[in-house]
Image: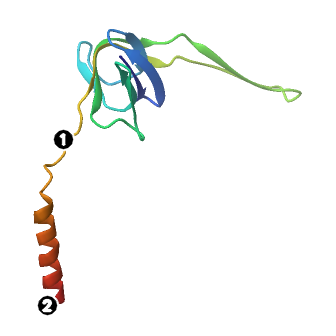
Amino acid sequence: MFAIIRSGGKQFRITEKARIRVPRIEAAIGDEIIFDDVLLLSSEGETHVGRPTVKGAGVTAEVLQHGLEEKIIVFKYKRRKNERKKAGHRQGFTEVLVRKISLHPEEKPAEEPAGEKASEKAADKETAAE
């Protein structure tokens, strides 16, 4: 079973018991978080594709740690202008452990018998005619 989720503007392919690093999430270490922005879910040969998300699907994960990625160097340069600018950046991340991937189908309202619908339409027509 695997799922593709969206978090922090990025997409991740995850499986159960996987450790992934997502962009920083405001949660305490040990907290349980739910990713409900599931774009695709596949289990036992059955695939559910979201439009844009799979309704009722969710991924439960536990926050393991927060940290900073390795520093990247941003260097801007314009030739013959003596214009140089150097900067660094470290992106924050949250490491999570995926506990459960689940699909809860939507509860559908009970369908009324066809006879009741027909009688309601007839009653609506009669009141409209008056």
Q: Please state if 85 lies on the left or on the right of 3 as rendered.
A: right
Query: Residue 8's x, y, as percent?
Result: 43, 29
Q: Nearer the viewer, residue 89 or 100?
A: 100
Q: How is the image coloured?
A: rainbow
Query: Where does label 1 land, which residue?
Result: 107
- In the rendering, which numbered label is found on residue 29? none
Q: Residue at x 12, y 56 (%)?
A: 112
Locate the C terminus and report the quarter of the image it occupies: bottom left
Q: Residue at x 15, y 52 (%)?
A: 111
Name, please, the residue furthest toward the front.
115
Amino acid type at image mark 1: Glu
- Say few, some or many: other residues with alpha carbon within 10 Å of mark 1 (under 14 / 14 to 19 / 20 or more): few
Q: Please state if 113 lies on the left or on the right of 106 as rendered.
A: left
Which sits earlier in the primary sequence, circle 1 or circle 2?
1
Locate the N terminus and report the quarter of the image it occupies: top left
Q: Is residue 98 above or below residue 105?
A: above
Q: Is residue 106 above or below residue 121?
A: above
Q: Please state if 126 lies on the left or on the right of 34 as rendered.
A: left
Q: Is residue 86 above or below residue 110?
A: above
Q: CA distance from mark 1 to mark 2?
A: 38 Å
Residue 21: which quarter of the image?
top left
